Image (tube, helix red, strand yellow):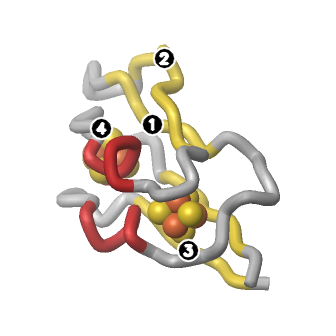
Amino acid sequence: MKGYIEIEKELCKGCQLCITFCPKKVISTSGKTNAAGYVSAQFEKSDACNGCAICAMVCPEVAIEVYRE
Ligand code: SF4
Ligand code: SF4
């Protein structure tokens, strides 16, 4: 199964939990601050994402949507 995610960068608080817990290591820090001043996470467009949704489950801000293909 393949998947991809979208991170709503304005909801992200830069806690990096999604980066830590993604088993495929396809989320990284964007290095860019959002309007609230947090350095948001970004999805590294990659076929490795399997749509497991762990990132969405650990995100305290509910900033991640997961899609499966
Ligand atoms: S759905 Fe799974 S593999 Fe894809 S980015 Fe989230 S945690 Fe990583
Ligand atoms: S878990 Fe959510 S709030 Fe934390 S860095 Fe990832 S997207 Fe941002």
Q: Identify residue type, mark 3.
A: Val
CA distance for labels 4 and 2: 13 Å
The correct choice, above or below, for 64 with respect to 45 in the image is below
Does residue 31 appear in the picture of this structure?
yes
Looking at the picture, does residue 39 appear above or below residue 69? Answer: above
Query: Disc 1 or 4, which lies upstream in sequence?
Result: 4
Q: Is residue 17 left or right of residue 28?
A: left
* First-in-chain label (3 vs 2): 2
Q: Could you tell me if the residues under marks 3 and 2 are in contact, i.e. CB atoms within 8 Å? A: no
Q: Amino acid at mark 4?
A: Gln
| Labelled disc at residue 50 | none
Disc 1 versus disc 2: distance between alpha carbons?
9 Å
Which marked residue is nearer to the observer: mark 4 or mark 2? 4
Does the residue at mark 1 contact the one at mark 4 (Cβ under 8 Å)? yes
Residue mark closest to the camera, 1 vs 2: 1
Please give the residue where the numbered disc 4 appears in the rendered image. Answer: 16
Could you tell me which secondary element the residue under label 2 belongs to? strand
Within 8 Å: ligand 2 and the Cβ of disc 1? Answer: yes
